[in-house]
Image (spheres, rainbow, N blue to C red):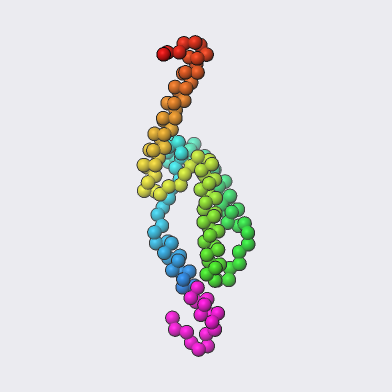
Amino acid sequence: MVASANDSAGARMKRASASIALAILAGGCAGTINSVAIRTDGQPIAGNPVLQHAYETDEAICRGEMQDASMSGSTFSNGSLASLVNQMERQDLATEALRRCLAQKGYVIVRQDEAAAKSAEFQTVAEAARQQQMTADRNAVAITTGSIDR
């Protein structure tokens, strides 16, 4: 980029900022990996109309919260690098709001290539929790009836 004698310092700064911004955006997009939502109980969403409907409803609610997070505050977009950085930070906050909301509803966002393994891990944990609860329930019944096996 060659600056002519007629270029103002502000114009050169704007072009330099735009070039840096493009480099940042291109670098950020180059390594993008698809992600998916999975249930924390390990049940697959796909193929189950009830769970698909529940997820779609929960996601719509959480996307609304994400939009609220990205709309809060004020942003001035004058094409500067600072504006771009501010916009990227707001997008990060909005994405985090989506993740938190979905987590509260029993979902986590994982890389697509790790989804099957993470879902299997959640299924194992959920099954262990069910087994512990069944044992606790049996012990509670045994205590109330006085028939504890020792």
Q: Is residue 5 above or below residue 108?
A: below
Farthest residue to the bottom: give it: 5
The x, y position of residue 14, in whole percent, is 52, 76
Farthest residue to the top: give it: 146
The image quarter containing residue 118 is: top left
Residue 60 seen = no
The x, y position of residue 9, in whole percent, is 54, 82
For the record, the magenta segment spans 1-17
Q: Quadrant of the C terminus?
A: top left
Residue at the image point whose x is 48% and y is 21% from the top? 137
The x, y position of residue 107, in whole percent, is 48, 42
Is residue 94 found left or right of 27 in the rendered image? right
| Nearer to the camera, 42 or 144 | 144
Q: Quadrant of the N terminus?
A: bottom left
Membership of 7 in magenta stretch: yes
Membership of 73 in magenta stretch: no
Farthest residue to the front: give it: 150
| Nearer to the camera, 121 or 150 | 150
Is residue 30 found left or right of 16 in the rendered image? left
Residue at the image point whose x is 50% and y is 14% from the top? 143
Q: Is residue 19 above or below residue 73?
A: below
